Image (spheres, grey):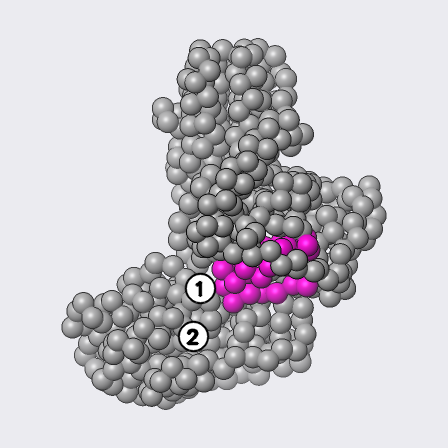
């Protein structure tokens, strides 16, 4: 098995691991018993790895319905004395926030580690919020690893801190740390605890106001203990390079700083912070007193900078501080060596020439992401687009959601006018339907439907909304790596599991217009869209066809393959396939339309829509 090596009890052995794989190893070395998640990039590989090894490791693991549920099941397991890990991408913590905040009050018996994977520069996200603020408002201790080795070591230490202080610990990572690869030295695997036991104590676990007031006082005491621990933690360290300049940094920014100081022989002492909340004030105070100038380097919000400036003012320490708040470092997007170089060159008055030897006038071509060849969502969008054209509706409002299908925003479909967050497609659709006289169509994926759309659909039915809601059921959680969800007969451990039927849920709410279509049957799908759009009230279409990548993989294993090509004698260059379906396998050259057989998926949708039968199947 690909991931079996992660289970080796081989202290001192070294492997080249992805940061997310190192997280799993760190949890195993801590004696992990229980884990849960809702998949989301950049944290997805943690769950993918656990999915492969959990049964063999004797760990319970689940892909929960959403992040709030994942938070709740792991919190309960930790309250029963088990070491539990819950993880998700940064916006997932928004979904889990209700349970997350109260878990800080209730505390934990077994270690509870919560990993939030932030996404500076929004490589696969709708915002780039800095989740260090969640540590501040909740009062939880927070660790920030900077490389693959620290991903393992910090997760392992987080469990120790959590059990020592009886409080959950937040581990905050970022995309570049989650997806870095590096040498990781293994430690010894700790024995698991197996089944836990929950000791009843309502005054400790039920935060009605009378109990919650006491819990808050206890939390404040834990925060003070954590503050002292942070100032003496080996996760924070000072690197001496001489001189009277100090640099305070954390996370991936530390790597760029370390390289810069070494490459340009900068005489600057570095305070590398790994235990960042509570702010290690005593350690930072000692550091400030040893330098004349301090440069604070951190991605996104000026958390360390604000704390440092406040500390310097309170302690009357006269030191010049540079950072984001005076404009030397950008507040938006992730850092790079060039960002660090430019900022430090200005601050330190250095004349450093760029080592980028590529001619600056050359611009790389834009390569926006597209729906894969054969993607059933493309056929669904084509059908919706054609139905609206045939009904002569030009101002329909299209709400969309989080998933591969968000790419429907691109031409020629333009099937995305409004998006907030996971599950917002239906709530927003209700709002537009009530606020305007325009026709409203909402799109949501199958995994997102289970995650957050059902309450909105109930709202739409109860409040008699006039809209069309389309569930794009491609039989997987595709965008994050094909993880299972409740609509599939398999669970997080890979075992057979009862699945939830989307059509039965919709009908159970009371909605009468519910039709399931195969989007590859384009004519039928257009017909159903027209019926739904002209229907008065709420209409739900379930476009059901598995992800093309899964279909491709199965065909390769079976050794069966076919593609489509264009018969140039029959083709009239009408543009229906190239301009309206717009599959990336279809292209124009010298006034003619062709199909790239290296990209063609063999789905046959283009052949279905060609009015001249010019697209023909070819066996390979």
Q: In this view, does 54 lie above or below 203?
A: below
Identify the image quadrant of the N terminus: bottom right
Residue span colored magenta = 60-86
Q: Position of residue 451 (x, y in %)?
A: 46, 67
Q: Give the quadrant of the C terminus.
A: bottom right
> Does residue 481 appear in the picture of this structure?
no
Q: Mark 2 points at which residue?
A: 472
Q: Position of residue 131 (x, y in %)?
A: 47, 44
Q: Residue 447 carries which label?
A: none
Q: Which of marks 1 and 2 is nearer the N terminus?
A: 1
Local crowd at mark 2 within 10 Å, few (<14), some, or many (≥20)?
A: many
Tell me: 528 left or right of 518.
Answer: left
**In the image, is residue 430 above or below residue 619?**
above
Q: Is residue 553 left or right of residue 588?
A: right
Residue under the image location 58 percent in, 61 percent down:
73
- Residue that protrudes farthest toward the left in the picture: 437
Q: Where is 14 relative to 469, above or below?
A: above
* Mark 2, secondary structure of its residue: strand
Instruction: Measuring from the top left, give residue 108's x and y in whole percent.
Output: 61, 50
- Residue 546 location, x and y as percent? 52, 77
Q: Could you say which quadrant of the image residue 390 lies in?
A: bottom left
The residue at which mark 1 appears reads as: 403
Asked whether disc 1 touches disc 2, contact meaning CB atoms under 8 Å apart, the reply is yes
Residue 493 visible in the picture: yes
Please give the name of the residue rendered at 63% of the width and 55% of the height, measured from the top-left corner: 78
| Magenta highlight on residue 309 | no
Q: In the depicted view, which residue is nearer to us: 78 or 347?
A: 78
Please identify the quarter of the rendering in which residue 588 is found: bottom left
Is residue 81 a member of the stretch shown in magenta?
Answer: yes
Q: Which residue is drawn at 38% across and 81% down?
A: 509
């Amino acid at each position: 098995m690909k991931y079996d090596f992660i289970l080796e009890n081989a202290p001192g052995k070294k492997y080249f691991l992805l940061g997310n794989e190192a997280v799993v190893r760190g949890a195993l070395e801590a004696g992990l018993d229980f884990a849960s998640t809702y998949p989301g990039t950049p944290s997805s590989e943690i769950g993918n790895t656990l999915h492969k090894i959990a049964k063999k490791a004797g760990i319970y693991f689940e892909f929960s319905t959403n992040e709030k549920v994942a938070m709740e099941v792991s919190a309960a397991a930790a309250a029963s004395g088990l070491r539990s890990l819950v993880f998700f991408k940064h916006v997932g913590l928004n979904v889990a926030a209700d349970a997350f905040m109260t878990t800080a009050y209730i505390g934990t018996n077994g270690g509870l580690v919560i990993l939030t994977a932030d996404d500076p520069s929004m490589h696969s996200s709708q915002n780039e919020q800095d989740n260090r603020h969640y540590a501040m408002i909740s009062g939880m201790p927070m660790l920030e690893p900077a490389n693959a080795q620290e991903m393992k070591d910090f997760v392992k230490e987080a469990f120790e801190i959590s059990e020592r202080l009886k409080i959950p610990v937040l581990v905050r990572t970022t995309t570049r740390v989650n997806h870095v690869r590096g040498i990781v030295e293994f430690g010894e695997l700790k024995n698991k605890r197996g089944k836990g036991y929950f000791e009843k104590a309502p005054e400790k676990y039920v935060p009605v106001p009378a109990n919650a007031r006491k819990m808050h006082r206890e939390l404040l005491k834990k925060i003070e203990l954590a503050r002292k621990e942070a100032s003496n933690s080996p996760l924070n360290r000072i690197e001496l390079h001489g001189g009277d300049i100090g640099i305070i940094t954390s996370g991936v920014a530390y790597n760029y700083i370390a390289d810069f100081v070494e490459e340009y022989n900068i005489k600057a002492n570095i305070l590398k912070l790994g235990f960042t909340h509570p702010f290690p004030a005593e350690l930072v105070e000692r550091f400030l007193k040893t330098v004349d100038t301090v440069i604070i380097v951190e991605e996104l919000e000026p958390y360390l900078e604000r704390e440092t400036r406040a500390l310097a003012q309170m302690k009357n320490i006269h030191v010049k501080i540079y950072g984001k708040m005076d404009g030397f470092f950008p507040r938006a997007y992730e850092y790079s060596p060039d960002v660090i170089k430019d900022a430090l060159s200005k601050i330190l008055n250095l004349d450093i020439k760029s080592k980028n030897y590529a001619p600056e006038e050359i611009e790389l071509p834009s390569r926006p992401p597209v729906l894969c060849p054969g993607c059933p969502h493309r056929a669904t969008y084509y059908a919706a687009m054609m139905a609206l054209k045939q009904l002569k509706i030009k101002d329909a409002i299209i709400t969309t959601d989080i998933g591969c299908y968000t790419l429907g925003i691109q031409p020629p479909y333009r099937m995305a006018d409004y998006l907030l967050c996971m599950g917002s497609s239906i709530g927003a659709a209700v709002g537009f339907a009530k606020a305007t006289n325009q026709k409203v169509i909402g799109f949501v994926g199958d995994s997102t439907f289970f995650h957050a759309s059902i309450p909105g659909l109930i709202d739409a039915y109860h409040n008699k909304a006039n809209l069309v809601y389309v569930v794009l059921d491609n039989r997987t959680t595709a965008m994050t790596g094909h993880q299972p969800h409740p609509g599939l007969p398999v669970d997080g451990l890979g075992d057979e599991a009862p699945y939830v039927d989307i059509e039965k849920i919709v009908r159970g709410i009371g909605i009468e217009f519910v039709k399931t279509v195969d989007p590859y049957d384009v004519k039928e799908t257009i017909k159903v869209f027209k019926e739904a759009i002209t229907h008065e009230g709420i209409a739900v279409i379930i476009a059901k066809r598995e992800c093309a990548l899964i279909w491709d993989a199965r065909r390769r294993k079976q050794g069966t393959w076919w593609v489509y090509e264009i018969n140039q004698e029959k083709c009239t260059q009408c543009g229906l396939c190239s301009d309206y379906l717009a599959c990336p396998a279809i292209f124009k050259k010298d006034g003619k339309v062709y199909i790239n057989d290296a990209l063609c998926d063999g789905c046959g949708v283009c052949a279905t829509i060609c009015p001249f039968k010019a697209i023909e199947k070819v066996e390979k």
